[in-house]
Amino acid sequence: MFSPGKKKSTANSPFIKTAGLVDEIAPGTVLPFKNGQFYLVRYADGGFLALSLICTHLGCSISWNSKEDQFVCPCHASAFDNKGNVMSPPAPRALDTYKVIIEDGVVKVDTGHKIKRKRFEKSDLVYA
């Protein structure tokens, strides 16, 4: 039964991946979730962003290079900054994102559909 105005729970969706507690994910952290197909990034200002780990060029899996502070695609050397913006082609656009949900101090990511974008926008970030 549905009630108007009630918040829809994400508990039973197979696409909702729990990333952890807000208070336990330090600012400046990049966490890989290989099974969820994303990286969760928490920025210095506290904002969260879930980036697809699939390169926008030909679909290879990217990896995080913490020394260079960038994501790198091993297939054709595309590189992305920590917000998913293209730094080195041939990738044609920024990494896709997933919706970040914060419920009761828990960070969750909805991997049900990718959000395609050309570049990072401040509005992409989610705050607790």
Image (cartoon, rainbow, N blue to C red):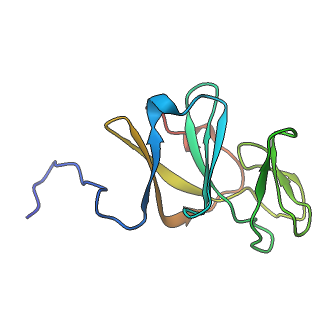
**Location of residue 127 with respect to 54 vertically, above or below:** above
Rendering quarter of residue 125: top right
Quarter holding the C terminus is: top left
Q: Which residue does the image show at 80% across and 69% down from the upper left?
A: 57
Q: How many tags in the picture?
A: 0
Task: Name the residue nearer the viewer: 5 or 21.
Answer: 21
Q: Is residue 92 left or right of residue 51?
A: right
Residue nearer the viewer, 29 or 128: 29
* Relative vertical location of residue 116 with respect to residue 106 in this rendering, above or below: below
Q: Which quarter of the rendered picture does the N terminus lie within?
A: bottom left
Q: Quadrant of residue 110?
A: bottom left
Q: In the image, what residue occupies the spot 83% across and 61% down?
A: 73
x and y percentages locating residue 30 in the rendered image: 66, 42
Q: Residue at x 74, y 73 (%)?
A: 59
Which percent across, then down, holds residue 124?
A: 57, 44
- Residue 16 occupies quadrant: bottom left
Place of residue 6 in the rendered image (x, y in percent of width and height, measured from the top left) = 16, 49
> Vertical placement of 29 versus 86: above or below?
above
